[in-house]
């Protein structure tokens, strides 16, 4: 059987095969050719073995991956997939076969393997499921519950709402649908951009998959077969945004050792059996073993892996409180764990103190052994909105809002995924595993549906159809702005959508500017600065000196609020594992909740006008020397540092850093820095797409870097200038305009 791989002018792979299974093998082969290093990094991250070649910086993630049992969950989900849906399981196996076939040559072309002395390993049938899970397990932001516990502990429960906004660890998207009544063609257009941490190579892969059953273009996740999030089959197109649903729970556990070789309070190597106190008042056996994490340029690290009836223990008590009482029995003495004390050892109730006991994670894939892969083939085969709708009935994780449209006028706006039914406390806080009432009681159904009003549907992580399923949502600014812009015309074309992707209006600047306008008695320099900002158009464009000045004042306000005695105690959270610390850092929390903090009726006695006054005087004394884009630069994550793109120091105009960007966190052009900490943008549009439903050949897309992950490829970074400017690349559908990649023509 023959597999054909073609390329367009941007190196995007267009694959053609005789059937879906051979096409999956071709997708794996092409991805291994283009992204071998990326694939192997993701495989190792899913297994918790990346520190073996990336060094100590990767240890925190590997520890979490082992304790969360990501690889084991992927194995279980694939075994269940083979039982429930053997066709999809065989299709996934074919993709893995293609990856394994292409990795040796792909690794030969990727210099990173030589740099770290890494040989490509073998992908297992469940590896794509592990990659998917590792990519999305933190997507719902369950560590935000750790933050809420800290806020309650220091400030009380009323303070939680002050910080309720799109936190620093979450990811989102813009997505919009306009019906034919608002387009030049009379057919719908679906467009948007997923916001994620920007990685090099990119987290999305432009690709075309064609066989007699289907012919689909879209954005794939490297390491996963098919096109899950954004696709166009020729007659129907779909896209997703993060629903901001809450579907992962943290349980405070009471654990004890029993049997030989361990005392309550002993550390990792103590041995023996472990039991967990259940809501029935009975001690139940917990699984327990140890694993060794190899660390390049470091000593191996032993990790204890424990799982209770709730789920894997992802935060051990000895990590939290230094090992004095890691199993939450309250005394840390030499209790042999005989089982006499059904209250957890000492009989003392730790109540809401999350730092006193280990924490276990309960999340749907571990419970159901299902990652939703049964949706992937039906999506490729979809011809109408009804087909997309049925496919997303099998979606599991992450929970998304789906928008779709077809050539016959069908429209879809719904939530897809699996959300457990449980108590409100589970959704908002860490709950006690030994108390009744925190069990899961089935699944939320039916999933909510949204509407298309006046020919427009917009989702940008704001409160919408997913409201019953979530706790915290993004501010409404992006969604409000998009709806307002879309409502101005009834002749939109696919090409027009690029301007919406790049809109830089910052509505969230209002509360700070309002406080600034009310100030009096400023020094002449500060008064002049204030007047400039009050006449500013509130657009965060890269060439704007006013935007740079606003950002400087905002950063100074954030730092001063975070340092205020009323809030500063939040800078000393419990010693949680490294992987959770972005959710617990005070400066980012203040930065992303600044609008709420400035508008609150009262803020623990903080005189916010005086904070703003001091910030303005500070910036007036040392104003920014350039425009917003001079410091607001792209800061992508790379598994290995790239000396070709040294970040240098902010403000140095002669370094070789990544390009300056327009946009900001609450702009439609969501290029997220962390005000008060850095202007560099680690998050932003991981891709942009415009699906012209009526005429697929008019569709457009772009990614931050390029189709290839190979540094010396001409398609390694060729889309970056376009991405920065807001230009889009045509989606090519005419096979005669493509070039065959004869190097990778293969026969079986």
Image (cartoon, rainbow, N blue to C red):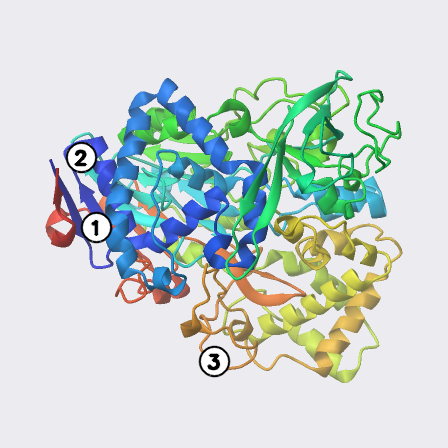
Q: Residue 202 appears at what percent x and percent y?
A: 39, 55
Residue plotted at (43% across, 68% down):
642
**Label 2 CA crowd tier, 10 Å (few <14, some 14–19, many 20+):** some
For marks 2 and 1, give the CA distance: 16 Å
Q: Circle 2 sits on which residue?
A: 211
Q: Circle 3 sits on which residue?
A: 655
- Quadrant for the N terminus, please: top left
Q: Residue 13 appears at what percent x and percent y?
A: 23, 50
Residue 18 has which mark? none
Horizontal side, residue 329 vs residue 487: left or right: right
Sequence order check, earlier mark of 1 and 3: 3
In which quarter of the view is residue 508 placed?
bottom right
Q: Does dot 1 land on a helix, a strand or a loop?
A: loop
Q: Does dot 2 land on a helix, a strand or a loop?
A: strand
For marks 3 and 2, give the CA distance: 48 Å
Looking at the image, residue 654 lies above or below residue 743: below
Looking at the image, residue 448 lies above or below residue 105: above
Horizontal side, residue 260 vs residue 649: left or right: right
């Amino acid at each position: 059987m023959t597999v054909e791989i073609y390329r367009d002018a941007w190196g995007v792979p267009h694959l053609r095969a005789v059937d879906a299974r051979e096409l999956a093998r071709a997708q794996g082969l092409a991805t291994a050719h283009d992204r071998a290093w990326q694939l192997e990094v993701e495989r190792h991250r899913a297994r918790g073995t990346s520190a073996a070649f990336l060094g100590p910086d990767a240890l925190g993630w590997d520890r979490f991956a082992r304790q969360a049992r990501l690889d084991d969950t992927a194995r279980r989900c694939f075994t269940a997939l083979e039982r429930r849906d053997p066709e999809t399981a065989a299709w996934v196996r074919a993709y893995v076969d293609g990856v394994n076939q292409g990795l040796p040559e792909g690794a030969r072309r990727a210099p990173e393997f030589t740099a770290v002395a890494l040989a490509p390993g073998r992908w297992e049938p469940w590896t794509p499921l592990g990659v998917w899970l590792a990519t999305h397990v933190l997507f719902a932001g369950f560590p935000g519950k750790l933050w809420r516990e800290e806020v309650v502990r220091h400030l009380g429960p009323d303070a939680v709402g002050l910080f309720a906004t799109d936190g620093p660890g979450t990811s989102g998207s813009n997505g919009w649908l306009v019906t034919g009544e608002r387009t030049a063609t009379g057919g719908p257009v679906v467009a948007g951009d997923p916001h994620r941490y920007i990685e090099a190579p990119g987290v999305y892969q432009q690709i075309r998959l064609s066989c007699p059953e289907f012919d689909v273009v879209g954005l794939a996740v490297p390491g996963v077969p098919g096109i899950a999030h954004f696709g166009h089959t020729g007659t129907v197109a779909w896209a997703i945004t993060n629903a901001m649903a809450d579907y992962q729970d943290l349980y405070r556990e009471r654990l004890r050792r029993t049997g030989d070789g361990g005392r309550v309070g002993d550390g990792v190597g103590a041995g023996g059996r472990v039991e967990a106190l259940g809501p029935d008042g009975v001690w139940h056996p917990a699984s327990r073993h140890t694993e060794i994490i190899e660390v390049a340029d470091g000593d191996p690290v032993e990790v204890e892996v424990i799982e209770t009836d709730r789920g894997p223990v992802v935060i051990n008590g000895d990590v939290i409180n230094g090992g004095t009482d890691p199993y939450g029995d309250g005394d840390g003495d030499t209790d042999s764990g005989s089982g006499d004390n059904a209250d957890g050892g000492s009989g003392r109730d730790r109540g809401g103190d999350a730092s006193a006991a280990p924490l276990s994670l309960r999340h749907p894939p571990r419970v159901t052994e299902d990652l939703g892969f049964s949706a992937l083939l039906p999506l490729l085969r979809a011809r109408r909105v009804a087909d997309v709708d049925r496919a997303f009935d099998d979606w599991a994780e992450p929970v998304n809002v789906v928008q779709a449209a077809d050539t016959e006028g069908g429209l879809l706006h719904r939530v897809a995924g699996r959300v457990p039914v449980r108590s409100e406390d589970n959704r908002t806080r860490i709950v006690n595993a030994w108390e009744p009432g925190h069990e899961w009681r089935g699944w939320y159904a039916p999933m909510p549906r949204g509407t298309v009003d006046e020919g427009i549907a917009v989702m940008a992580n704001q409160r919408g159809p997913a409201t019953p399923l979530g706790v915290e949502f993004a501010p409404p600014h992006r969604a409000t702005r998009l709806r307002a812009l879309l409502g101005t015309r009834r002749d939109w074309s696919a090409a027009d959508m690029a301007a919406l992707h790049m809109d830089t209006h910052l509505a969230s600047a209002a509360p700070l500017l309002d406080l600034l306008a009310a100030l009096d008695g400023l020094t002449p320099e500060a008064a002049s600065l204030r007047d400039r900002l009050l006449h500013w158009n509130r657009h965060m464009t890269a060439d704007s000196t006013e935007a740079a000045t606003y950002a400087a004042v905002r950063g100074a306000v954030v730092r001063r609020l975070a340092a205020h005695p009323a809030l500063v105690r939040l800078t000393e959270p419990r010693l949680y594992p490294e992987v959770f610390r972005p959710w617990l850092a005070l400066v980012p929390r203040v930065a992303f909740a600044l609008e709420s903090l400035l508008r609150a009726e009262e803020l623990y006695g903080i005189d916010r006008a005086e904070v703003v006054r001091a910030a303005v005087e500070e910036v007036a004394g040392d104003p920014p020397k350039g425009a917003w884009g001079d410091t607001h630069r792209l800061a992508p994550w790379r598994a290995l540092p790239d000396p070709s793109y040294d970040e240098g120091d902010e403000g140095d105009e002669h370094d070789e850093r990544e390009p300056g960007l327009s946009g900001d966190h609450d702009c439609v052009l969501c290029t997220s820095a962390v005000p008060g900490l850095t202007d560099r943008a680690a998050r932003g549009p991981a891709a942009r797409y415009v699906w012209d439903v009526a005429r697929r050949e008019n569709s457009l897309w772009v990614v931050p870097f390029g189709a290839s992950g190979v540094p010396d490829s001409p398609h390694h970074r060729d889309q970056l200038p376009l991405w920065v400017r807001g230009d889009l690349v045509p989606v090519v559908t005419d096979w005669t305009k493509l070039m065959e990649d004869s190097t990778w023509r293969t026969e079986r």
